[in-house]
Image (cartoon, helix red, strand yellow):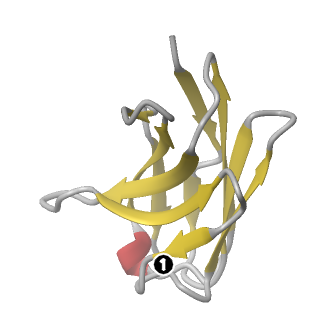
């Protein structure tokens, strides 16, 4: 059974930084990443890192967010810098298993406000 435990959300002013963490148990992964969902919008994948270390970033976060992983701990991190009002959303950790299934965490709220 795959379990994803997220932490690190919170409130910050524009221009601030937050770091999200997600620890996976019960599975090896093909890739892990982060998606976000703001009220009234569909969930979008913002960053992803594969088992070989290659990364993906959406255009909206490129240059501001950095995804990294610690394979030994089964943990993926999302360092978010220069946060903007439009980054406000619930952020969900995603694990893509080798057998093709996507698993999502419970979500953590990130609020950027002045």
- Based on the displayed image, in which of its 4 quarters is residue 24 positioned? top right
* Mark 1, other Cα within 10 Å: few <14 / some 14–19 / many ≥20: few
Q: Residue at x 36, y 32 (%)?
A: 101
> Could you tell me how many numbered marks the image carries?
1
Between 44 and 13, the one lying in front of the other is: 44
| Residue pointed to by mark 1 | 114
Q: Which residue is at the far left?
A: 40
Instruction: Identify the image quadrant of residue 22.
Output: top right
From the top left corner, tell me how far across and down residue 70 is, in percent. 82, 46
**Depicted 36 relative to depicted 97: above or below:** below
Q: Nearer the viewer, residue 91 or 1?
A: 1
Q: Is residue 99 left or right of residue 69?
A: left
Q: Nearer the viewer, residue 83 or 105?
A: 105
Q: Is residue 72 above or below residue 79?
A: above
**Residue 28, position as x, y percentages in the image:** 64, 29
Residue 55, compared with residue 14, is above or below; it is above
What residue occupies the far front of the structure in this picture? 99
Q: Farthest right residue? A: 72
Q: Position of residue 57 (x, y in %)?
A: 51, 75
Tell me which corner region of the image, top left, top right, bottom left or bottom right, holds residue 53. Answer: bottom right
Q: Residue at x 47, y 43 (%)?
A: 94
> Would residue 62 appear left or right of 70 to someone viewing this image?
left
Whole-percent x, y for residue 106 in the image: 42, 31
Q: Residue at x 56, y 48 (%)?
A: 31
Q: Using residue 64 as the reference point, say whether residue 60 is left or right of it.
A: left
| Residue at x-position 71% and y-position 58% | 52
* SS of the residue under disc 1: loop
């Amino acid at each position: 059974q795959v379990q994803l435990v997220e932490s690190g959300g919170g409130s910050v002013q524009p221009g601030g930084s937050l770091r999200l963490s997600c620890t996976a148990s019960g599975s090896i992964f093909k890739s892990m990443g982060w998606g976000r969902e703001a009220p009234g919008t569909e969930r979008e994948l913002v960053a992803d890192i594969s088992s070989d270390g290659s990364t993906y970033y959406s255009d909206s976060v490129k240059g501001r967010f950095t995804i990294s992983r610690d394979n030994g701990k089964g943990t993926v991190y999302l360092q978010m810098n220069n946060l903007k009002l439009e980054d406000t959303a619930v952020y969900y950790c995603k694990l893509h298993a080798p057998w093709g299934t996507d698993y999502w965490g419970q979500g953590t709220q990130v609020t950027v406000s002045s």
